[in-house]
Amino acid sequence: MKLASPIKTSSNFTVNAPLGGVDSNTMKFWGVWAAALTPVLIMFSLVLDIAPFMHIDEFMTIDLGRVILQPDTTWSIAWMLERNQAAFVFFYVGPVLQELAYQSIGEYGPRISGILGAVAAATAMVGWQHTRGTSGYASLVLGLIFLLDPIFVQAYTIGRVDGWAMAACLTACWCLESINKEDEIAAVRHKLILAGGATALAFFIWPSAIFLLPLVLFQLFTVIKRAKTIKPRRKVHQNNAVFLFIIGGSIASAALLIPIAPKLLDLLGNVIDGVIINSRTGTANYTLLDSQRITTGIKHLLQVLKFTPVLVTMALIGAFRGREWGLIAAGAVATLLMIATVVYSHRIQYLLPYFIVMTSGLIKRETGSNLTSKIKLSGVLALASLLVWSAGLSLIARSIIAFEGKRELNRGQIYATAQEMIGVGEYAVYSFPYEFYYAGRSLGWKMYKPYLAVGVDPLLHHEVLQRMLKKVDFAIMPLPRLTPELEEQIQKAGMYEKGVYQVYEASLSGSDNRVTNKTRLQTFFFIPRQPYGPYKLYEKIKLTKMAN
């Protein structure tokens, strides 16, 4: 099997191995990358405690990890009502990582982990792109563009683990691309097995990694396609290449299943229900090819992509200029798969690696000598505009908005409110607002929320609400969402109003709620004005009687 030649370049940096050889050029290359990351990490750390506000996804991921570590727990904010038990997931690596980050570092641990996962993904993207034939500086800039893309920033700053899943997939691509004609047969086999293992690991970190599977397969078949016999002793048949990739994935999957195997067998139905919940919307008439749902999904896709229009435009130009038909097909498959399941911003981010690779077609150094100076300049300007757009929104605008709302975003207010409302004790609490999760755990609460499909509002499904309220001593409800009908349902569950609790001294005026570009960014980055409260607390009547 003749494999890709090592990269030979007259550019500033050279990387010839999957993880880079330890030579002066490689050290210089990664030193520049580390230097570029430093101000980015400093900027994110300055607003880590306030931006974004305490988000549902952060707590859901942590709690899924807590359940893995404590499978016999009697409470969860991902409670399976039909089975009367906490949701148990096979993709445990990411959630357990976040729970351990919380236990070891504290409430900011999961956000730090999320940011580090994004850095790992961007680093893998840099290495992969440089190995694919993109010049040193261009690879570094593409990595920064990826790391600072507003859609990606929105996700990893709330403590999601998508960055770690992407890092595994992109490492697999990097490893495959690094296969070269100088490799001995054993080295080729090891890289194929390693790539398969990294791909499998991604699925155990977070299942949305499936949207990057077409990209990994594109890279695998790109390597196979360019393979030609050079020396019999180095020949690997294309069928063997696929087989070795699958072997790597199978070995990694088997090893990763071992820690949860006993519980996985006992809770198989639970796991299957969880997969179904995460792969569809909550509409009762859900069908795979429902035209209205597909249309809605496409609209939402476009609404989210408007926050990174320059990247999308440059990606399409780069893909067609580079004639990356396989890459275009892979991106189309991922998009169709997304539309066929559930479209929302935290899944749309999985299209970003496709866009970055497509954009590299504007500045691939292998074709650089054949390009006119005018076309070369257009590629440089394209990268510059992308970096300015991403950094301007994700570093500058986001930080300004966060600092302006620092007092309103202070999470200490939530702890004070939780203490005032319920206080310390092993109380069963239905907390519709997720922001009480950290405070509740520190106070000893057992918190419940139903684990439902995207689009299902438990406050609008009275049967779900009634079954949930039967399990709890207290219920915290968002005052703006309460209606006479909903209050009647709460009272039917044997609960009475204990009081209304305000977080802020004064509410926003009508003029503060005007829609502007600033408010759009506040909403997009989850840094709104006054995100917390007011709340209405309900207590089960039996507690009062016992106290008397």
Image (cartoon, grey):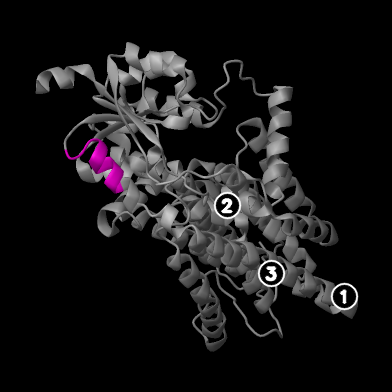
Q: Are marks 3 and 1 in contact (CB under 8 Å)?
A: no
- Of tags 2 and 3, the one toward the viewer is 2
Q: Which image quadrant: the C terminus?
A: top left
Task: Return the residue at label 3.
Answer: 388
Q: Which mark is residue 522?
A: 2
Sequence-first disc among 1 and 2: 1
State the image coordinates of residue 93 (x, y, percent, origin top left).
38, 47
- Of tags 1 and 2, the one toward the viewer is 2
Q: Is residue 135 left or right of residue 25?
A: right
Q: Three-letter amino acid code at disc 1?
A: Leu
Question: Disc 2 to disc 3, how far (Cα)?
Answer: 19 Å
Tally of numbered tags:
3
Secondary structure of the residue carrying numbered label 2: helix
Secondary structure of the residue carrying numbered label 1: loop
Region in magenta: 415-424
Q: Nearer the viewer, residue 206 or 39?
A: 39
Sequence-first disc among 2 and 3: 3
Q: Is residue 425 left or right of residue 191?
A: left
Residue 181 appears anywhere in the view:
no
Q: Are marks 1 and 2 in contact (CB under 8 Å)?
A: no
- Residue 295 in the image: above or below residue 17: above
